[in-house]
Image: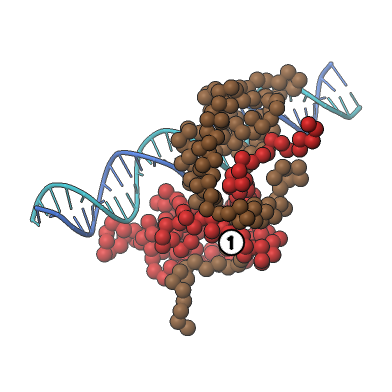
Chain colours: A brown, B red, C blue, D cyan
Amino acid sequence: MADQTIQSARRFDSLEQEAYLSLWRTYDRLKSIEEAFFQKWNLTPQQYNVLRILLGSESPLPTLAIATKLVSRAPDITRMLDKLEQEKWIARSRSEEDRRAVMVSITAEGRKRVSDMSDSLEEMHREQLGHLGAKDLRSLVDLLAKVRQPFEPPGSSW
Amino acid sequence: MADQTIQSARRFDSLEQEAYLSLWRTYDRLKSIEEAFFQKWNLTPQQYNVLRILLGSESPLPTLAIATKLVSRAPDITRMLDKLEQEKWIARSRSEEDRRAVMVSITAEGRKRVSDMSDSLEEMHREQLGHLGAKDLRSLVDLLAKVRQPFEPPGSSW
DNA sequence: GGACGATAGTTGTTTAGACGAATATATTAG
DNA sequence: CTAATATATTCGTCTAAACAACTATCGTCC
């Protein structure tokens, strides 16, 4: 009868709920570290993502192909690319074969920006997760893959 | 020389990075399920969170006390509460002891809304995570706690 | 080869989030 | 008791996200 725990306010209705809220909270904590980092370099995580995708691609990509490769969906690719283009990190040109498509490529300046960030980005990731050992990190990665697997479209690369 | 894997574009610089991007991606997938759910009930996850917090509290809470209990920080509590008040799910009144503070409480209608949602919310969480067994869910919850532990303020209830 | 539906991208609008300044009240120092 | 400082909340503004409507081009079917 006694002995309600202090935080009786936080009780979970199910293990599934607890897991989801833990995921939310944990992501929120790590994200704030990430955001602070990218702010120093004057771009958003998603913008950096686009640069990485273009860097990883041999040839220019059409706008919408980039969207499908992003970590989280961005409904507003055009305006996002506008900003990257303003900064001269990417270049766009209309495709000759299919004049509907706009091909996007990374510029030399864009490459430089990514490589300039590389070291401190790694350091940031260590700050986020370096306190876990390799074994825990691997378990985490595996569990997360199992969590999202049913929600990934067939050929998704996730 | 042959045999680059198809998705050579996705390579991780470190295990930490892989873990973080996995977390991001996984959260994004589950969040989209959650958002679709809450949209049907015409409120945002954060708004629901506020209702839950108020429900869990015996007595009315000052505005800023709510902020510290949220899953992710909401810098704009006032306007969020405005919306909940419009819907008559919460009530606000200025505190007598400290006239700077605004005390927030849940209304009968607010309670009803939360309890009406209860069953289908549980179902939603099963959709998100029901495909994992209890053992995996528990490992996940534990690992996530370990991940965010250094970033939680001392008395945070997380 | 012209109409039709599909596809690629852009633009407009509404809404929520970030950030800083402003207001009202409380607390403390002298 | 008055000034100075701190606290709780709100308001104004600017930026980013969500969603829908629009334009241009393509592919295909008679």
- The front one of C9 and B114 is C9
Total marks in image: 1
Q: Left or right of A99: which side holds B138?
A: left
Q: Secondary structure at mark 1?
A: helix
Q: Could you tell me residue B24's position as x and y percent?
A: 59, 47
Up/down of B15 relative to B106, above or below: above
Provide the chain ID for the residue under circle 1.
Answer: B
Up/down of A77 relative to B37, above or below: above
- Residue at coordinates 61% horizontally, 56% vertically from top-left? A136
Q: Could you tell me residue B56's position as x and y percent?
A: 47, 68
- The front one of A130 and D3 is A130
- Residue at coordinates 53% horizontally, 39% vertically from top-left? A121
Q: Amino acid at mark 1?
A: Val
Residue under circle 1?
A: B141
Q: Residues within 10 Å of mark 1 (few under 14, many from 20)?
A: many
Q: Could you tell me residue C25's position as x and y percent?
A: 23, 56
Q: Is residue B71 visible?
A: no
Q: Could you tell me residue B46's position as x and y percent?
A: 50, 54
